[in-house]
Amino acid sequence: MSTIIKQLINKKLKQLSPDELLRYAHQYGFSIDKNQAKEITAYLRQNPINPFEPEERMKMFKELARITDERTADKAQKLFVEIIKSYGMEGLFK
């Protein structure tokens, strides 16, 4: 089951659209603009990222900080952890 969940999460990251990312940003209180959303989604599509590995996640959040700012990346990282815990998926993420 965990393999299927991991595949779904990876697929969602690769298929995330800029408009969808902007909706999520608004929903969760992030401030990003259209160009940043385009750059973030392009990065996710073009770079193989395994969010289940700590080193890969850190790489992703560092890139997010480069595209946006440190504060936004920190907030995204905290939200990521909260979502993982709220769905009881800590076991999938190292």
Image (cartoon, grey):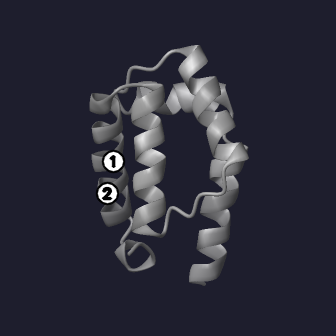
Query: Which sits in the foreground, 34 or 62?
Result: 62
- Mark 2, secondary structure of its residue: helix
In the displayed structure, 85 sits above or below 13; it is below
Q: Are marks 2 and 1 in contact (CB under 8 Å)?
A: yes
Reply above or below: 49 against 42: below
Residue located at (27% from left, 30% from top)? 71
Mark 2 or mark 1: which is in front? Answer: 1
Q: Which residue is mark 1?
A: 77
The amino acid type found where label 1 is placed reads Gln
Q: Nearer the viewer, residue 39 or 80?
A: 39
Amino acid type, mark 2: Val
Asked whether 31 or 39 is in front, the reply is 39
Which residue is tagged 2? 81
Residue 38 percent location from the top left of the image:
64, 25
| x then y, percent, for residue 50 | 56, 64
Task: Tell me which residue sits at (36%, 72%) in the image.
Answer: 88
**Mark 1 Cα shell of 10 Å, populated few (<14), some (14-19), many (≥20):** some
Left or right relative to 59: residue 36? right
Task: Report the side of 93 relative to 12 (left or right).
Answer: left
| Disc ID at residue 35 | none
- In the image, what residue occupies the spot 36% across and 41% down? 76
**Real-space Cα separation, disc 2 to disc 1, in angstroms:** 6 Å
Instruction: Kindly indicate the quadrant of the structure image that contains residue 16.
Output: top right
User: At x 37% / y 26%, what residue is drawn?
Assistant: 30
Q: In which quadrant will I find the C terminus?
A: bottom left
